[in-house]
Image (spheres, coloured by chain):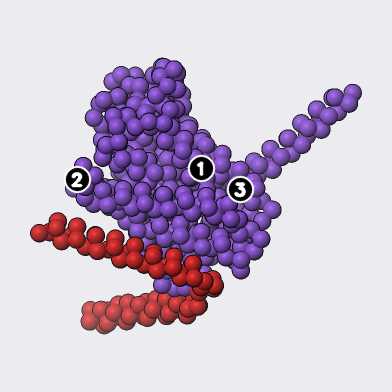
Amino acid sequence: MAFENGMMLGRVREFIRRQYLIITEINRKYATPRITMSRWVKLSLLLLRLYLIFLVLLLGYRFLTLIS
Amino acid sequence: MNFWSNLYYRYRRFAKAFKLYLILTGPGIIVMMADNDAGGITTYTVTGAKFGYGLIWFLLLLIPVAYVAQEMTVRLGAVTKRGHAEAIFDAFGSFWGWFSFLDLSLVNWLTLVTEFIGMTAALLIFHVPAVLTIIVVSVIMMLMVLQGRYWTWEKIAIFFSLINLIYIPAAFLVHPSVSDVLAHGLIPHFPGGFTGELFFFLMANIGTTIAPWMIFFQQSAVVDKGMKEKDIPWGQFDTLLGAVFTALVAIFCIIMTGTVLLGVNIGSAAQAAELLMGINPYVGTFLAIGLFDAGFLGAICISLASSWAFGEVFGWAHSLNFRVREAPWFYACYLFALVTAGSVVLIPGAPLVLITLFVQVIAVTLLPAALVFLILLLNSEEVMGRYKNTQMQNIVSCAIVIAIIILSSLYGISTLFPGWLG
């Protein structure tokens, strides 16, 4: 039983390690954005980041008001 | 003689063009008709019952909105030969790539749950148990993709898209007054004044017109179909035709409930179908069939959009032209989405209303990003070459995208804080 559990744990570890490697490989492949980072592109991405932060804060606030 | 030879020449030219269109038609029509999914049909039926024909003009305005956003995906897909998820990773790096991909996966899965809710609710009217609906629908959807050809899948999907037009005869069956429809529907006005409730419904109709999955779906479908740069005009025509049809379906849906259920407080399309069964069984049946078909169309497109995105990001084989053994992960992903989303609907006491509301909120986090990336990609010389946006296209698409972002954000926020709009 202990041997089987150990085998199972080993398989899970191997699976997680493989997924980690795949994700690392994807991150390496797309490390450099291909698009030219002009002023407009940078500004658009900055605004998008701010917009998403605003939405996350709003969702967090709603969550807090719901549980309180 | 000259007249007849001219006429024959024109006929031959038209027949040739029509044949070519039949070959190239697909992604545009399917995505636009699937846009009228279970959630969309609910929005239109409730809008009709609440405001009568008063907002038909607004739906006509949404034709160019839907066309402009979706047309860009045709060009992007045909030129880059990449789906939207892969294009974002490649152009903007892994941070934005993962953000879009994970957000899309979540939104799509939640939307898939709402499609199953719509389908089960529609068939419950005919006393079909929810378990049976989910099993049969999942089996049909799997068979549709397992036959190993994109072309066959597309033609079956077009067949289901045509069933979506069932709302047109249904609206005629309730004998609406044409003069009333024209007088109240086509002249822009705000029925009952510009109230918070009306604003919410305007936003809801915009929210159903453009959804994040549509952008990812159409671009991947264009790539899977193998469309080339020379096919772009046909893809654009297909998208325009789809945009017109989707608006027609929405308008006839509104005419149907606006004629018979005006002033009745309904919460969903299924409820409207049940009420209509008592008034005119044919119309109720048509609405229920249409609701089921809308959910089914939405489900086949959404689950495919997710599978394509997974394949693009993880580098798996991801085409409907592959057999299961050639693209096992692609089909496994598709099956996983179907089984898990369908199972949620069967869980007793599952928070289905909460899920439906949550979809609208989460979609708001992805839609602006997907649209901004679309415009940035379409403006990149190195990505699009001579097919990049012209100045005029930029003015129109930027104006539309900004309007969509503002209105869909307000819609999401008002879903989070219901009393906010008054």
**Dot 1, how many residues are within 10 Å of its Cα: few (below 14), some (14-19), or many (20+)?**
some
Q: Is residue B287 in sight in this rendering?
A: no
Residue B403, position as x, y percentages in the image: 41, 49
Q: Is residue A24 in sight in this rendering?
A: yes
Quadrant where the image shows the C terminus of chain B: top left
- Identify the hue of chain A: red
Residue type (three-letter) at the residue carrying disc 1: Pro
Q: What residue would you read off at disc 2?
A: B419
Q: Secondary structure at mark 1?
A: helix
| Dot 2: chain letter | B
| Dot 3: chain letter | B
Q: Nearer the viewer, residue B151 or B393?
A: B393
Marked residue nearer the N-terminal end (3 or 2): 3
- Identify the hue of chain B: purple
Residue type (three-letter) at the residue carrying disc 3: Gly
Marked residue nearer the N-terminal end (1 or 3): 1
Q: Secondary structure at mark 2?
A: helix
Q: Is residue B314 left or right of residue B259?
A: right
Residue at 29% x, 79% y is A9
Q: What residue would you read off at disc 1?
A: B64
The quadrant in which residue B183 appears is: top left
Marked residue nearer the N-terminal end (1 or 2): 1
Q: What residue would you read off at disc 3?
A: B235
Instruction: Respond whether the residues carrying marks 1 and 2 are from the same subunit.
Output: yes
Residue type (three-letter) at the residue carrying disc 2: Gly
